[in-house]
């Protein structure tokens, strides 16, 4: 577990490459078999460069980043994220964030998800802005906020 | 774009109740699929050491899955909730999501999702294109009507201005 967060702290980033098999697994795990997320022929007919990563996975990755940072005694109470650009099969993203407010009970953060180019450098935002409130010192929630 | 027909959609609801408990495997599967190896999703002893009753699911799964819907797959493979809004000569894009969580999901939870269209508004994009922004909210509850989570999402219809 990390030390008590402070305003201005940066969150250890999370990077992930999302390959077509990952997208097939995600489609199965979410019961979402929409063809644009895994079918090369379908997306080619739509004149897209490749299968589109389901944007909601970015929310899952941001929560993973927060929980990896704060440890099991935390609870993500809220998170919001705005989509900017599509991500395609085989690309990589970097999730990043910074602490903007802290109390004894919670930490507030702002975050981004950036799609990386083949050189590993930032290419375009997949998500911006994003923010979250994470409860501290507890593994579960408190009911409806 | 904001026609009377679209305005009439605001306030409409759809309710789906899962035919069975959520199950521990669903959370473990989702963790594997996204590459999140957090033991809270697969190790009951670890979860209990943290004060939980047992394993849970990655928090966002409840807002991402169609598991509860019981709907058949459509022609493009989609088997989840949709409002079926079709607007000619527009491109449909997703704006974003906002989730609120009341507690962690438990394998024995039987999820009910109540979807509602909460807003429909017409705006102009930075490039001057007309846009219709439709906001929906899903509220997830368990078999005792206890609040689990809420998912507010926006879908944007962008006028193609005669292009297709």
Image (spheres, helix red, strand yellow):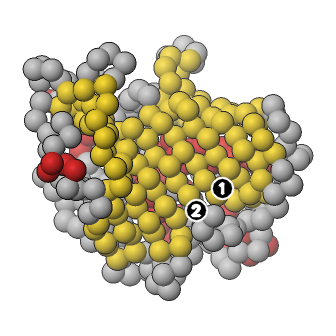
Query: Which image quarter: residue B94?
Result: top left
Q: Nearer the viewer, residue B109 or B141?
A: B141
Asked which secondary structure carries label 2, the reply is: strand
Please say if B106 is above or below A28: below
- The extreme bottom residue here reads B144
Please say if A98 is above or below B18: above
Neighbourhood count class around disc 2 (C-alpha, 10 Å): few under 14, some 14–19, many 20 upward: many
- The extreme right residue here reads A3
Residue at horizontal 22%, vertical 56%? B9
Kindly check if marks 2 and 1 are in contact, taking CB atoms under 8 A apart as contact: yes
Residue A79, image x and y in percent?
A: 58, 48
Residue B79, image x and y in percent?
A: 25, 59
Residue B2, image x and y in percent?
A: 20, 40
Please say if B162 is above or below A1: above
Looking at the rendered image, the quarter that the C terminus of chain A falls into is bottom right
Q: Disc 2 designates what residue?
A: B101
Q: Is residue B46 visible?
A: no
Residue at horizontal 10%, vertical 20%? B162
Judging from the image, mark 2 belongs to the subunit labelled B
The answer to whether dots 2 and 1 both sit on one chain is no
Q: Which mark is residue A18?
A: none
Residue A106, image x and y in percent?
A: 77, 53
Please say if A30 is above or below B85: below
Residue at horizontal 64%, vertical 46%? A132
Asked which secondary structure carries label 1, the reply is: strand
Q: Nearer the viewer, residue B61 or A90?
A: B61
**Mark-to-mark CA distance, 2 and 1:** 7 Å
Residue at horizontal 48%, vertical 29%? A126
Number of on-image labels: 2
Q: Disc 1 designates what residue?
A: A76
Judging from the image, mark 1 belongs to the subunit labelled A
């Amino acid at each position: 577990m990390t030390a008590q967060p402070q305003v201005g702290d940066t969150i250890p980033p999370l990077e992930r490459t999302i390959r077509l098999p990952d997208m097939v697994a995600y489609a199965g795990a979410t019961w979402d078999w929409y063809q644009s997320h895994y079918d090369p022929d379908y997306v080619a007919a739509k004149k897209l460069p490749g299968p589109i990563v389901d944007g909601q996975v970015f929310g899952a990755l941001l929560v993973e980043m927060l929980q990896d940072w704060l440890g099991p005694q935390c609870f993500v109470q809220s998170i919001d994220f705005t989509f900017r650009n599509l991500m395609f099969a085989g690309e990589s993203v970097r999730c990043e964030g910074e602490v903007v407010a802290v109390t004894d009970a919670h930490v507030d953060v702002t975050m981004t998800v950036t799609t990386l180019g083949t050189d590993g450098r930032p290419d375009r935002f997949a998500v911006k802005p994003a923010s979250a409130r994470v409860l501290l010192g507890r593994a579960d929630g408190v009911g409806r906020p | 774009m904001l026609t009377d027909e679209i305005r009439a959609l605001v306030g409409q609801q759809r309710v789906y109740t899962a035919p069975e408990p959520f199950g521990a495997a669903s959370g473990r599967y989702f963790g594997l699929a996204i590459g999140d190896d957090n033991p809270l999703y697969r190790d009951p002893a670890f979860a209990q050491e943290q004060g939980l009753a047992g394993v849970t699911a990655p928090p966002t799964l409840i807002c991402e899955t169609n598991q509860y819907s019981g709907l058949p797959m459509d022609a493009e493979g989609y088997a989840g909730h949709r409002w079926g809004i079709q607007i000619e000569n527009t491109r449909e894009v997703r704006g974003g999501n906002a989730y609120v969580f009341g507690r962690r999901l438990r394998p024995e939870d039987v999820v009910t999702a109540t979807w509602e269209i909460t807003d429909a508004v017409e705006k102009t994009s930075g490039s001057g294109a007309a846009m219709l922004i439709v906001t929906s909210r899903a509220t997830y509850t368990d078999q005792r009507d206890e609040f689990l989570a809420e998912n507010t999402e926006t879908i944007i219809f962008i006028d193609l201005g005669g292009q297709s």
